[in-house]
Structure formats: structure tokens, C-alpha cells
């Protein structure tokens, strides 16, 4: 079963207390696609890059089996670039620069083969763009979208219209609180449900994630790590891993969603052990399964 992922494909500059990397492969679409691909589902990526985007990065994605028919390269354009700096405890990140470049005028048209994808993940992007993708999709079984504080503040009306069309909203704890204006996460999630989605998944960083529907609650723990190198893309890896598992199983039941969240948590734990997707390049599925089993045992009582 296929997963259609629409998101950014970027060149990132990341500074941590111990290191700095420049123009590494990043973007919400990339992290999500690489994570989903662990489950050997058909992964289709929609995004845009400029003429300056290294061929080695697109070659890597292609060798992973990710379908790049929907990745548009603008011959005379510059790629999206983002820079960030993390504090000592990694809980605080300052954005150093954001250069939208080709993303600012991107209006994706889905290839015909993509329109029939049963599982659709709209990674962090303009809600107007996300809505345009939904309108092009023919009959998706599950639509999941992510968002961020910028869209909550700047495109609130479009975001509310989007929520009426999606099955699951994924966002972090501060974004949920901002959207509703309530510091209580359970009340915030329940209030978001009234905008239309059937499920709200709130990411809480090192404290895991929660899933809230009108009739269920689930809390997924984070995998305990003693060393963090770079948290960039962890949330996108979580969502992508979750979508990859759902597509592989071909089911959207409560039990499947819960297992998918644990798999997403595990894949995100590998993501933060190195910069960019460097750690994912060498992760074996047996390692993912082992951490999944560890988390399963940790929460059993």
C-alpha cells in the first residue's frame, strides 16, 4: 500500500553545543519519507528543490526506493534553506535563518499515479497548499497532516478549513496550546477535535506523544536515550514512521494506530542520534524491532 508524502526538501545548517553542519539534507518531507520507507511501503514524495540541490541527495533518496516523480527541480531557482541553533539541553532552538526560495511559489500538481495513494501525509506546510493536495487526491483511506505555530498565527482560517478535511492532526504540545489558548493538553486536544479531525496526536518531545479521540486516549513513551546529537526532524520521522507502518498493515484501527505511534517513536529515536538522516542510513529493521519490543515491555503492567 502506498504513502504519499507532501513536504519540504531542504538544505539545513544546524549548530549544537558540540558541532556544526552546513547544507545537509533535511526537510519535513525528507525525514517523513525516509522513516516511512523502513516498512517497505511504496513511498511517493512531493516537494520542490532548486538547481543548487546536490544530486547526491536525490540519488540517496532514489536508492532507498522513494519515488521522486513528484519532486520538482526548478532550473533557475534556489533551494529552501534553514538554519538553527540548539541550546545545551536541546529543548531550546533558535532559528538563525529561513530562506524559502523556490518553496514560496510552489503549487504542486500531483502526477496521476500519486492521486490514488491510499495514505496521505501532509507534512508541515502552508494549509492552503495542503488543502490543494487533498482536492487532487481521489479516494484516500487516511489523511494525516502536521502544522506549526507560524500557520496557526498567520493562516488560521485556512488551517481551520483544512482540519475539516483531515482524519488526524499531528502537532506538538506548544502548538496545541497556542491553537486553543489552553495550557491543559487534554482540553486542548479535545477542543481541536471539534474542528473536524477524528484524532489529534500531540508530540511532547522527550516525553513521548499522546493520541486523543472522542472515545479513546493513548500515551506513547519516548525511547530513553543517554545521548542526543541533533533533534531536527524527529517529529517528522515520528509521523513518517507511523504512516509507513499503517500503510504496511493496511488498517487504521485503534490497535494499529497505537502500534504505529510506538514505531514512529522508535524511528525518531534513531533520528536524533546523528545529524540529518545519517543515522537512518545504517539502521537495520532488526534494531527498530528491538527498540519496539523494549518499549512494549516498558509500558506493560
Image (tube, grey):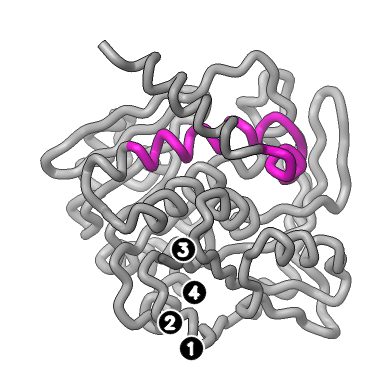
Q: Which residue is identified by label 4?
A: 129
N-terminal label among 2 and 4: 2
Label 4, secondary structure: give it: helix
Residue displayed at 64% across by 57% down = 30
Label 1, secondary structure: give it: helix
N-terminal label among 2 and 3: 2
Q: Which residue is identified by label 3?
A: 122
Q: Position of residue 184 (x, y in %)?
A: 29, 29
N-terminal label among 3 and 1: 1
N-terminal label among 3 and 4: 3
Q: Nearer the viewer, mark 2 or mark 3?
A: 2
Q: Is 117 drawn above or below residue 18 in the view shown?
A: below
Residue displayed at 32% across by 40% down = 181
Left or right of 93? Residue 197 is: left
Q: Which residue is identified by label 2?
A: 115
Callout 1–callout 2 Cβ contact below 8 Å: yes
Amino acid at each position: 500500500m502506498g504513502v504519499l508524502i507532501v513536504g519540504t526538501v531542504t538544505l539545513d545548517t544546524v549548530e549544537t553545543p558540540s558541532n556544526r553542519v552546513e547544507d545537509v539534507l533535511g526537510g519535513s518531507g525528507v525525514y517523513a519519507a525516509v522513516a516511512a520507507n523502513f516498512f517497505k511501503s511504496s513511498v511517493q514524495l512531493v516537494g520542490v528543490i532548486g538547481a543548487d540541490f546536490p544530486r547526491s541527495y536525490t540519488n540517496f533518496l532514489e536508492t532507498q526506493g522513494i519515488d521522486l516523480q513528484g519532486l520538482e527541480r526548478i532550473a533557475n531557482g534556489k533551494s529552501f534553506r534553514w538554519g538553527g541553533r540548539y541550546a545545551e539541553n536541546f529543548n531550546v532552538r533558535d532559528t538563525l535563518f529561513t530562506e524559502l526560495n523556490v518553496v514560496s511559489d510552489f503549487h504542486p500538481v500531483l502526477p496521476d499515479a500519486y492521486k490514488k495513494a491510499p495514505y496521505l501525509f501532509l507534512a508541515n506546510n502552508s494549509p492552503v497548499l495542503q488543502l490543494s493536495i487533498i482536492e487532487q487526491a481521489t479516494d484516500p483511506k487516511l489523511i494525516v497532516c502536521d502544522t506549526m505555530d507560524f500557520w496557526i498565527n498567520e493562516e488560521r482560517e485556512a488551517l481551520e478549513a483544512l482540519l475539516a478535511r483531515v482524519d488526524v492532526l499531528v502537532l506538538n504540545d506548544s502548538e496545541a496550546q497556542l491553537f486553543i489558548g489552553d495550557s491543559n493538553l487534554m482540553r486542548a486536544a479535545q477542543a481541536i477535535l471539534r474542528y473536524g479531525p477524528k484524532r489529534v496526536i500531540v508530540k511532547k518531545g522527550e516525553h513521548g506523544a499522546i493520541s486523543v479521540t472522542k472515545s479513546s486516549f493513548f500515551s506513547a513513551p519516548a525511547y530513553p536515550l543517554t545521548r542526543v546529537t541533533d533533534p531536527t526532524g524527529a517529529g517528522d520521522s515520528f509521523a513518517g514512521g507511523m504512516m509507513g507502518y499503517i500503510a504496511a498493515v493496511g488498517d487504521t484501527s485503534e490497535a494499529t494506530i497505537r502500534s504505529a505511534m510506538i514505531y514512529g517513536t522508535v524511528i525518531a529515536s534513531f533520528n536524533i542520534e546523528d545529524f540529518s538522516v545519517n543515522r537512518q542510513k545504517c539502521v537495520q529493521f532488526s534494531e527498530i524491532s528491538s527498540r519496539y519490543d523494549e518499549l512494549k515491555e516498558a509500558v506493560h503492567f
